[in-house]
């Protein structure tokens, strides 16, 4: 008979970090350490901004109001889901390069270049304009990052930024932007 209960989880442990943030594991990826380090840095910035954009979509989804509430409520949730998918793809690329991806809200708050919204509810045009500005931040970083990754020979990061980040964010900009066209909801005549 065992002296201890082997089924009892041993949750009282000494926490230890096994890879410090900002370091790279050695991996046989055919990329220089400089290229990998540059890509990890770029991708962590894209990740922070994408996480903030994702969370803005959910905030605005919850706080949407007005005549187009239902349509925008659904659209914002759809865009949130896509941004959540992109967050996972970017974080996994960082890990695949041997780096460490940011992962917690306080890291996002420290790193994001997207302006923090107020805690309260904003009107619909403000919420949509805020989303468009956040997309601009992500897209600018993605374009710059794709060019840098291409120049360093990191085809995987370049492909992720172009094929996934840019090609997902551009149609979202279009869909959100069209809601800000100055057209009447109903005809007056």
Image (cartoon, helix red, strand yellow):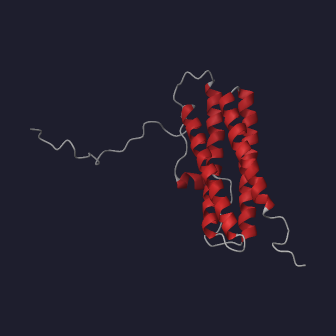
Residue 24 found in image quarter? top right
Residue 163 percent across, percent down from the top left: 71, 37
Which image quarter holds the C terminus? bottom right
Residue 67 percent across, percent down from the top left: 72, 74
Q: Is residue 64 left or right of residue 1?
A: right
Q: Against 182, is 92 above or below?
A: above
> Looking at this view, is 64 or 101 the one in front?
64
Instruction: Kindly give the residue lying farthest to the right in the view shown.
Output: 189
Instruction: Kindly give the residue lying farthest to the bottom in the view shown.
Output: 189
> Residue at the spot x=30%, y=45% of the render?
13
Q: Is residue 136 left or right of residue 42?
A: right
Residue 33 found in image quarter? top right
> Residue at the spot x=36%, y=44% of the render?
15
> Looking at this view, is 23 or 62 the one in front?
62
Query: Count of labels shown?
Result: 0
Residue 42 percent across, percent down from the top left: 66, 40
> Residue at the spot x=26%, y=46% of the render?
9
> Residue at the spot x=69%, y=33% of the render?
159
Which image quarter holds the N terminus? top left
Instruction: Kindly give the residue lying farthest to the front in the view shown.
Output: 189
> Looking at this view, is 115 or 71 the one in front?
71
Residue 75 percent across, percent down from the top left: 67, 59
């Amino acid at each position: 008979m065992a002296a201890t209960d082997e089924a009892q989880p041993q949750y009282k442990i000494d926490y230890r970090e096994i890879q410090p943030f900002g370091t790279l594991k050695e991996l046989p990826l055919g990329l220089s350490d400089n290229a990998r380090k540059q890509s990890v840095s770029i991708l962590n910035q894209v990740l922070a901004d994408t996480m903030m954009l994702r969370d803005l979509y959910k905030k605005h989804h919850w706080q949407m109001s007005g005549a187009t509430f239902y349509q925008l409520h659904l659209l914002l949730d759809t865009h949130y889901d896509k941004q959540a998918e992109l967050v996972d793809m970017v974080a996994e690329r960082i890990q695949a390069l041997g780096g460490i991806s940011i992962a917690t809200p306080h890291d996002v708050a420290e790193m994001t270049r997207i302006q923090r919204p107020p805690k309260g509810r904003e009107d619909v045009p403000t919420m949509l304009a805020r989303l468009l500005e956040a997309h601009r931040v992500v897209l600018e970083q993605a374009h710059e990052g794709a060019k840098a990754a291409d120049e360093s020979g990191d085809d995987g990061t370049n492909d992720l930024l172009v094929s996934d980040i840019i090609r997902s964010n551009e149609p979202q900009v279009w869909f959100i932007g069209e809601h800000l066209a100055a057209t009447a909801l109903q005809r007056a005549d």
